[in-house]
Each structure stands twice: as C-alpha cells, then as structure tokens.
Image (spheres, rainbow, N blue to C red):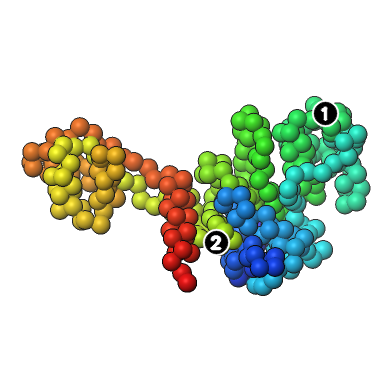
C-alpha cells in the first residue's frame, strides 16, 4: 500500500446534465489514500450526483474519472469500494446481523466478517434486534457496517449524519475518525461545516455544481488574524495601515480586523499607544471554515451574476 500521496480517486472535468440543468460542472478532484476527504456544499450543490457517478450509478455527460485505477462502476473497482449513498436499505423484519449476513453471502464472506464489522460500528449488543426497531443513528451505523464488509480500500459516505440528533452525530463522527485512524480512506459528502472541519484532512468545496476550491482545512481558512478594539477607530485604522499595509486592514462591528499573526501584536500596540489611541482589546482571531466557505460561495454567486 502507498502513502497519502497515492491518488485513489481522480476526476477531470466530470460533468452531468439533466436536460437543460447542469448538475455537476467540470469537477476535477483528487482523493489520496489514507485521508478523510470532505466534499462540502449546500443541499443541491451536486455532491450526491458526483458520488453516484464515481460508483457507476449515473453515467457522466462529460469528463472522466478513475476509482482505484479503474473506470467508475467496473467490477474490479467496486470490489474494493464500500458505499452508503442516500441512506441504508435493509429488510425491516430481519435483524441487523441477518441483514448483513444476506449481503455477506453475495460477497462470499462468512459470519466472522459480519461479526467484525458489527464490532467496528458498536452494534454487537443490538445485532439480534430487528432492523425496524433501530433508531436512525443505529440504522446509519448498520449502513456503514454493510459498506465495510470485505475491508474495502475506499469508503464513500453520502451525508452520513443526515437526520441524526446531536448524540447520533457525535457517535458517527467518532466512528469515521476511528476508521481513519486504522488507515481507512473515507470520502464523505456533507453540508455541515462543523462536521467537515472536525473530521477531514482535505476538503473540496462545491456550489451549484462547480468545485470552488480543494485544499486542507488549514489552507482554506487562510492566515489567522488579529482583532483590535481601539478609540478613536479612524486614527487606529490609519496607524494599522501604516504598520501593516492598507490591504491587510479592515473594520467590522466597530473593531479592526487585521491580516497579521500574533507576532505583530506588540509592534502594533506600541504604535497605537504612541499615537494616543486607547487600546481596549487585542486578541488573535481564527478564520473559521465557515468564514472561508461563505466568502467563496458569495464570490462565486457574484461571478455568475456578472458573467454574460
């Protein structure tokens, strides 16, 4: 097995049209072995359609993709992929264990494999209960267990915490993180910024079918900044622009927001005090993934409005 530099999902210009509607617009992304890759975007952005194309469930209109070195949907590739897309489907009158046994038989796996995945998702104690008696969180975990049968190289999860209560969401996040810690490669879609920020090594941001960015969470956030509250604000702004440069200074909610690290705080504070500015607060301010996401999607919406 290779390291995280090995690319196991690659798309180039992947496109899907439904009539006049462009659902996925020339998406090019890369998922590396051993990482948790977050496909982030609002509902209707094209996440599920993209995942369905990677699994061979939907035929692309244009572009190309490889999954584990094979075309999407090829038996050789699918044999090494586990997926949970648009919710799990099981026989309601069978137990969790028996539902997995049905799937295991098709894959020529034994009861040892079933017991192993039940243990992984922490469902062993309830494995004998009928599926219809399961909570939504338990149903999602059984869906992940089914995807894990056969120890796939790649796990594709579509909105794995969708509809779960806070406790169920926390359980699912813990499960995904545990899978990543044991070397599983996970590609998950989500519209929840906090979920992606907590779980993912790298993120692809999609909006209206277009991939806007692909990078680590840290890189997408950008440089941390400083928040400064000072009076008079106009004088403080002028001093900050002189020290840091005008392009690194902005104001919001009666405070200065500066694109500068904490190492510049002492220098800036001295300059403000020497200019007779009363400084009441100076503190580092992390740029969140939410900040970056809304900035990117707002810029994209503006671009679409202004493009003929």
Q: Residue at x 66, y 40 (%)?
A: 162
Closer-to-camera residue (34/175): 175
On the image, the x and y values in percent for residue 216 come to: 49, 53
Q: State the CA–CA distance, disc 2 to disc 1.
A: 40 Å
Residue 236, located in which quarter of the rendered image? top left
Q: Is residue 70 left or right of residue 262?
A: right
Q: Which residue is mark 1?
A: 133
Q: N-terminal of the two: label 2 or label 1?
A: 1
Q: Residue furthest top?
A: 125
Q: Is residue 33 left or right of residue 128?
A: left
Residue 155 vs 172, above or below: the answer is: below
Asked if the residue under mark 1 is in contact with the one under mark 2, i.e. CB atoms within 8 Å, the reply is no
- The answer to whether residue 37 is visible is no
Which labelled disc corresponds to residue 291?
Answer: none
Q: Which residue is mark 2?
A: 211
Residue 91, located in which quarter of the rendered image? top right
Q: Residue at x 76, y 57 (%)?
A: 80
Q: Residue at x 90, y 35 (%)?
A: 94
Closer-to-camera residue (151/30): 30
Q: Residue at x 52, y 41 (%)?
A: 194
Neighbourhood count class around disc 1 (C-alpha, 10 Å): few under 14, some 14–19, many 20 upward:
some
- The answer to whether residue 154 is visible is yes
Closer-to-camera residue (15/271): 15
Which structural element holds mark 1? helix
Image quadrant occupied by the N terminus:
bottom right
On the image, the x and y values in percent for residue 133 come to: 82, 28
Which structural element holds mark 2? strand
On the image, the x and y values in percent for residue 52 come to: 72, 58
On the image, the x and y values in percent for residue 7 come to: 62, 63
């Amino acid at each position: 097995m290779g390291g995280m530099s090995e690319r196991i999902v690659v798309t180039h210009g992947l496109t899907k049209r439904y009539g006049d509607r462009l659902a996925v617009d020339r998406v090019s992304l890369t998922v590396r072995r051993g990482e948790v890759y977050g496909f982030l975007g609002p509902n209707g952005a094209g996440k599920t359609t993209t995942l369905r194309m990677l699994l061979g469930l939907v035929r692309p209109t244009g572009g190309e993709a490889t999954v584990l070195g094979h075309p999407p949907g090829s038996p050789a590739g699918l044999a090494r992929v586990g997926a949970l897309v648009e919710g799990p489907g099981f026989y309601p009158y069978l137990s969790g264990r028996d539902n997995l046994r049905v799937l295991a038989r098709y894959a020529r796996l034994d009861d040892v494999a079933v017991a192993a995945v039940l243990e992984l998702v922490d469902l062993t104690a309830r494995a004998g209960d009928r599926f219809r008696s399961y909570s939504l969180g338990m149903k999602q975990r059984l869906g992940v267990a089914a995807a894990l049968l056969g120890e796939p190289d790649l796990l594709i999860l579509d909105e794995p915490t969708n509809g779960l209560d806070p406790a169920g969401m926390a359980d699912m996040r813990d499960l995904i993180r545990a899978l990543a810690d044991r070397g599983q490669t996970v590609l998950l879609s989500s519209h929840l910024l906090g979920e992606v920020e907590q779980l993912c090594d790298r993120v692809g941001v999609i909006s209206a079918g277009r991939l806007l960015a692909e990078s680590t969470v840290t890189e997408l956030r950008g440089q941390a900044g400083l928040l400064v509250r000072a009076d008079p604000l106009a004088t403080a702004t002028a001093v900050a622009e002189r020290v840091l440069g005008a392009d690194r200074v902005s104001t919001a909610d009666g405070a200065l927001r500066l694109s500068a690290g904490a190492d510049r705080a002492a220098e800036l504070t001295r300059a403000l005090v020497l200019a007779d500015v009363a400084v009441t607060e100076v503190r580092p301010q992390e740029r969140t993934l939410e900040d970056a996401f809304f900035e990117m999607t707002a810029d994209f919406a503006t671009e679409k409005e202004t493009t003929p």
